[in-house]
Image: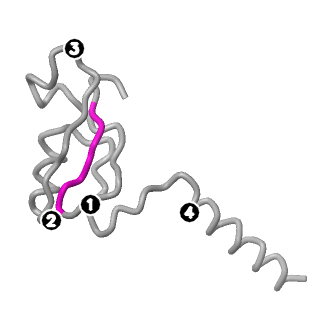
Amino acid sequence: MKRWIAIAFAVTGLGLVACGEEDLAGAPDVRGLPLPEAKTQLESAGYAAAVSDDATFGVIIESHFTVCDEHSPKGSLVPIDVSKDC
């Protein structure tokens, strides 16, 4: 019985990780960070940020934006979604 509980826990745990999570392929997880800090961490790890925003005039003052979502890297480019309100 304990064995089946352990197996069920392991299977559901793996399902939670695989469902809805992006494979960052070694890129640092920068979700929730201010944009300047996120870009610094990505650059330190050898990546560049491809910034997508929801602002009318784009990102003018980077420190006013937070990384809301991060997507799988495409080579050394990491697509990130930023907003003033995540």
The crowd level at tag 3 (other Cα within 10 Å; few <14, some 14-19, many 20+) is few
Q: Is residue 3 magenta?
A: no
Q: Quadrant of residue 14?
A: bottom right
Q: Which residue is labeled 4 in the image?
A: 18
Which segment did they paint magenta?
A: 76-82
In the picture shown, does residue 52 fall above or below 22? above
Mark 2 vs 4: CB contact within 8 A = no
**Counting residues from the N terminus, which is met first, the one under dot 2 or under dot 3?**
2
- Numbered mark located on residue 56 in the image: 3
Left/right of residue 16 with respect to residue 40 in the rendered view: right
User: At numbered mark 1, what does the secondary structure look like: helix, strand or loop?
Assistant: loop
Q: CA distance from mark 2 to mark 4?
A: 24 Å
Mark 2 vs 1: CB contact within 8 A = yes
Q: Which residue is labeled 2 in the image?
A: 45
User: At numbered mark 3, what does the secondary structure look like: helix, strand or loop?
Assistant: loop
User: At numbered mark 2, what does the secondary structure look like: helix, strand or loop?
Assistant: loop
Q: Nearer the viewer, residue 36 or 57?
A: 57
Q: Which residue is labeled 1 in the image?
A: 28
